Amino acid sequence: MSPQRTVAVLVGSLRKASFSRKVAKALAAVAPDNLHLEIVEIGQLPPYNEDEETAAPPAAWVAFRDQVRGADAVLFVTPEYNRSVPGFLKNAIDVGSRPYGKSVWSGKPGAVVSVSPGALGAFGANHHLRQSLVFLDVPAMQQPEAYIGGAAGLFDEAGTLTNDATRTFPDQVHGRLRRLDRGQSQGLIMQNQATDPAAWPALSYETLKDTCETLQLWTQVVGKVRLAQTPWLNHSWHVPLYVTARGLTTSLVPHPAGAFDLEFDFVDEVLRLRTSNGAAAGTPLEPQRPQASTTA
Ligand SMILES: Cc1cc2nc3c(=O)[nH]c(=O)nc-3n(C[C@H](O)[C@H](O)[C@H](O)COP(=O)(O)O)c2cc1C
């Protein structure tokens, strides 16, 4: 199994009913086993004042810096205040960046999710924040871009995501964050993989043994589903997988409720189901625990 990774989550809202916090919690709730998303509270941090950067700085600053330093990555989930991020989130960023030369942000992989009840999905906040991340040397995830608009209509009473399109989003984010497991923080910002020699490293069976075995089992499951759904005609027993820009896919599989295909998306590490009537779902590509038996 891949090692356990911790992602420090900074939420840019103090509001009890904050949509941003609901998004952060929804992402944490569906994180794969090896990815632990932990909200680091930042509302209590005293405003940054360089005069207090003494041998004994405020305890809350020290605790915050330690928490971020100990995390493998950082995820910002923020609303937009006047086309930027709320002041206390910027304060947390400033606190973490000092004392000079000891920034907790340097080289730490990051991702930004911006949230707004408005239509623009807090685009301004998202990119204003990214400006600081460039300076702070935080390699920030570029895709999927995450501008969550119309946030007021995305959750039910319990704070669960109810919107179909948005429900697949956590899978995509986690798929990208899981690249940390391969020690590829730079993979988060790699854009030209097709032309970059580093995109074709030597493969080690020892390192990839688990992935190989898992994939073999997953492809068997998909093949059997395909076989079971296809009318028994000449050659229907061939169940090839076709190469796509993101991995491998079945061809269209017939089904009484609407045809579907199943794509192994190795970029986001998700098995995607898409149906001809527009529905979509995804499940992380990772070993599954056996379900407890319910039969006596
Ligand atoms: C001071 C202030 C400034 C705001 N500016 C913007 C803005 O620039 N763009 C926007 O989409 N929403 C803006 N809003 C509305 C917020 O998006 C909205 O209050 C949102 O629910 C806050 O996020 P939360 O639900 O996570 O607390 C602003 C709200 C406040 C209080």
Image: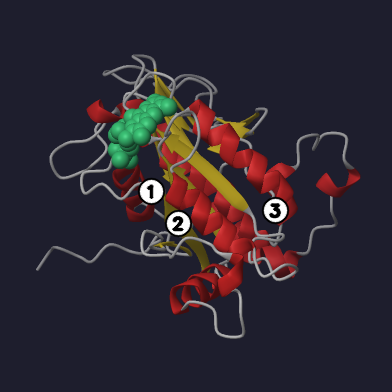
Give the residue at x 66% y 39%: 131
Task: Give the farthest residue toward the bottom.
Answer: 55
Where is 274 relative to 129, above or below? above
- x and y percent of residue 181 in the render? 62, 62
Closer to us: 174 or 233: 174
Q: Which residue is mark 3?
A: 136
Quadrant of the image occupied by residue 203:
bottom right
Task: Identify the amino acid type marked 2.
Answer: Val
Which disc, if any, is residue 9?
2
Residue that mark 1 sits on: 27
**Foreground residue among 201 and 180:** 180
Q: Amino acid at mark 3?
A: Leu
Q: Where on the image, by quarter, is ligand 1?
A: top left
Please state if 133 lies on the left or on the right of 70 as rendered: right
Q: Residue at x 64, y 55 (%)?
A: 109
183 left or right of 96 in image: right
Secondary structure of the residue carrying tag 2 is strand
- Which numbered disc, 1 or 3, marks the residue closer to the eye? 3
